[in-house]
Image (cartoon, rainbow, N blue to C red):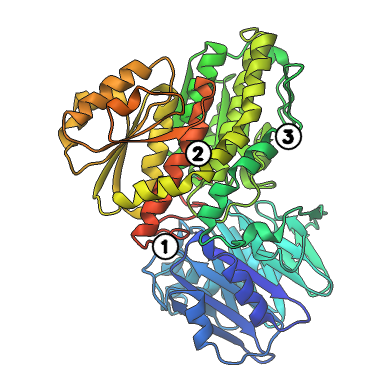
């Protein structure tokens, strides 16, 4: 989704803006632009297309204050006029979010004599700030934002002044020596500073070269904490891999290990979850749990449902965030929101709905300081490190890891898992990173199968119980990055209609690891084979039966039935990756998908 960067300092701003914008490319965008104060006036350069294209058209500009933007079109087509920054008089603005009352404001500003040239809502903001400007940019921005309904992260320049503000859209301020930065995502400025201030909703920051002042809506100064960001810049680089996605698939054993680290003792059968602010009594008396998420995080939540039900024998609801907000939530229940970015607008809206109904709330997220983490009662972090590829991979694995820990912990507290079982489960869980590595070492085989399927137009992924969410995730990954139509189905459901679509031209990936539903799964495989489908099974290393029924088998190490989804996940991710690569797709920046979706 859109990205913002801004700089006020002692160095030339253009190379810093361009470098920082490039670090936001992974979020997906269709146009880019910068505005720089050159000592006399604000110069704006922008265009449809990529940042390298923008660089080609940039003249030499001298200036030490500027703003930059990558746009992902929501309101108005992706073209040069609609690209940010937008200007009005001496004001230049970049904006993420949506101004809901833009039409009323546009009508009013037009009557007041302002001329609009773009189709965007952002241009309203530029004119509005200009309208209120009276030699103080901070005041003008504060007054203008009071008229705005909707969400925003903005950076505004006028002469040598830089002002930033946010509501429901992330924005951080980077603190340097004689220079300060603004960015919608930390990786954009990691090259320059590790000290950041997280701006809160409705705060406005005036950013000079050597100091930053932050105000609330009444213009009272707000004291903010400076956080030291402990991220490795190499996490935001490809380190020799062709794509971030492939690198991040390979980082999964480490991400899983990090997410477990310090939280379990398999010898004592103990789980300790930092950030979980629920008492044992609250857990024992919990009547209802809802999991809420979107996309890949929803698939993690669906597996979470099976895990919690297995460990606590309690019914769990799992819902798509954009639907949950219209549903009834009962006070006293626990709502678990899952979001790698911690910024997804649909998930945030559902969380707010749940809070206003009196639910207890818990977030599973990867991004410290993200909006969701600041609004929930408890946060259990996944520790994947930054995920740059737009398609979620290692964050999914870490979400699953947290869901395993939470469900086992709840089961233990509720007296449904005894100490011996807990020790056994934790010992198996600790083996998972090494088992994933074995699959990764076998990736050439997976690549060969994937290449066979690269020209298929339709795909099915099927699985039962714990593997059903992984069938959904496999289909989602394939759709997102290869643009092939793919369906994820509970295998038992095929005979209720979808079998009509199975032909010799539709490959079926059957996740058939050993477990309680294995025999039924084999029957479902026979059903699709009877329709001439090519069936590739994902099966345990020691399963000598499956090859009788399928065309090909990819083996995964044997583990506890409920842990096998993590191993199948690595396989379906690699299948999707290699198919997309064979089709020459832009894997790290797939069309129409953004890394954090901050609009509803
Ligand atoms: C899939 C993908 C999206 C996200 C969804 C939720 O690869 O990236 O489906 O999973 O937009 O995002 P988060 O987890 O940030 O709330």
Q: Is 562 positioned to the left or the right of 408 in the image?
A: left
Q: Nearer the viewer, residue 216 or 459?
A: 459
The local secondary structure at tag 2 comes to: helix
* Residue matched to label 3: 261
Marks 3 and 1 in Cβ contact (< 8 Å): no
Judge whether 247 appears above or below 274 on screen: below
* Residue matched to label 2: 297
Q: Nearer the viewer, residue 513 or 192?
A: 513
Name the residue rendered at 79%, 74% in the picture: 179
Could you tell me how far apart the alpha carbons at marks 2 and 1 are, in whole angstroms? 22 Å
The local secondary structure at tag 3 comes to: loop
Could you tell me how far apart the alpha carbons at marks 3 and 2 are, in whole angstroms? 22 Å
Residue 402 picture location, percent across and down: 62, 31
Judge whether 89 appears above or below 476 on screen: below
Q: Residues within 10 Å of mark 3 (few under 14, many from 20)?
A: few
* Residue matched to label 1: 586
Residue 262 picture location, percent across and down: 76, 32
Judge whether 471 appears above or below 233 on screen: above
Ligand 1 neighbours mark 2 (CB distance < 8 Å): yes
């Amino acid at each position: 989704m859109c990205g913002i960067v801004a700089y006020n300092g002692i160095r030339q701003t253009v190379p810093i803006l361009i470098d920082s914008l490039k670090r936001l490319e992974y979020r997906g965008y269709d146009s880019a632009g910068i505005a720089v104060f050159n000592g006399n006036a604000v110069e704006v350069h922008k265009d449809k297309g990529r940042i390298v294209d923008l660089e080609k058209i940039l003249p030499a500009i001298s200036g030490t204050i500027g703003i930059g933007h990558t746009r992902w079109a929501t309101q108005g087509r992706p073209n040069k006029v609609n690209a940010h920054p937008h200007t009005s008089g001496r004001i230049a603005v970049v904006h993420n979010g949506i101004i809901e009352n833009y039409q009323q404001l546009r009508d009013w500003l037009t009557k007041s004599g302002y001329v609009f040239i773009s189709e965007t809502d952002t241009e309203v903001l530029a004119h509005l700030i200009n309208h209120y400007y009276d030699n103080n940019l901070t005041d003008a921005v504060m007054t203008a934002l009071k008229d705005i309904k909707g969400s925003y992260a903005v950076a505004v320049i006028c002469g040598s002044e830089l002002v930033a503000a946010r509501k429901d859209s992330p924005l951080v301020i980077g603190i340097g020596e004689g220079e300060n930065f603004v960015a919608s995502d930390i990786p954009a400025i990691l090259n320059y500073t590790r000290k950041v201030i997280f701006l809160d909703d409705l705060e406005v920051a005036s950013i000079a070269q050597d100091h930053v002042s932050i105000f609330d809506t009444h213009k009272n100064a707000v004291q903010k904490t400076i956080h030291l960001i402990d991220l490795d810049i190499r996490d935001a680089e490809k380190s020799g891999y062709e794509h971030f996605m492939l690198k991040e698939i390979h980082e999964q054993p480490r991400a899983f290990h990090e997410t477990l680290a310090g939280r379990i003792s398999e010898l004592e059968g103990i789980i300790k979850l930092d950030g979980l602010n629920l008492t044992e009594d609250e857990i024992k008396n919990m009547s209802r749990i809802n999991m809420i998420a979107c996309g890949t995080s929803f698939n993690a939540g669906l597996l979470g449902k099976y895990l919690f039900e297995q460990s606590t024998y309690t019914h769990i609801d799992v819902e798509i965030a954009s639907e949950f907000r219209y549903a009834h939530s009962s006070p006293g229940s626990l709502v678990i929101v899952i979001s790698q970015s911690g910024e997804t607008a649909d998930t945030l809206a559902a969380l707010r709905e749940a809070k206003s109904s009196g639910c207890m709330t818990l977030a599973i997220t990867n991004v410290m300081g993200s909006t969701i983490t600041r609004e929930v009662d408890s946060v259990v972090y996944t520790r994947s490190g930054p995920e740059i590829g737009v398609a979620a991979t290692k964050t999914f694995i870490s979400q699953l890891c947290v869901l395993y820990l939470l469900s086992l912990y709840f089961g233990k507290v509720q007296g449904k898992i005894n100490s011996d079982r807990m020790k056994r489960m934790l010992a198996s869980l600790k083996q998972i990173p090494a088992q994933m590595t074995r699959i990764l070492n076998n990736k050439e085989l997976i690549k060969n199968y994937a290449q066979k399927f690269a020209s298929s137009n339709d795909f099915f992924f099927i699985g039962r119980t714990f593997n059903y969410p992984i069938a959904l995730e496999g289909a989602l990954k394939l759709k997102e990055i290869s643009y092939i139509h793919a369906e994820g189905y509970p295998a038992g459901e095929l005979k209720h209609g979808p079998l009509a679509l199975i032909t010799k031209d539709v490959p079926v990936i059957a996740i058939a690891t050993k477990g309680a539903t294995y025999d039924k799964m084999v029957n479902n495989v026979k059903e699709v084979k009877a329709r001439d489908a090519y069936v590739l099974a994902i099966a345990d290393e020691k399963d000598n039966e499956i090859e009788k029924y399928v065309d090909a088998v990819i083996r995964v190490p044997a583990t506890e039935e409920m842990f096998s989804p993590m191993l199948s996940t690595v396989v379906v991710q690699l299948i999707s990756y290699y198919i997309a690569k064979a089709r020459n797709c832009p894997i790290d920046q797939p069309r129409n998908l953004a890394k954090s979706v901050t609009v509803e």
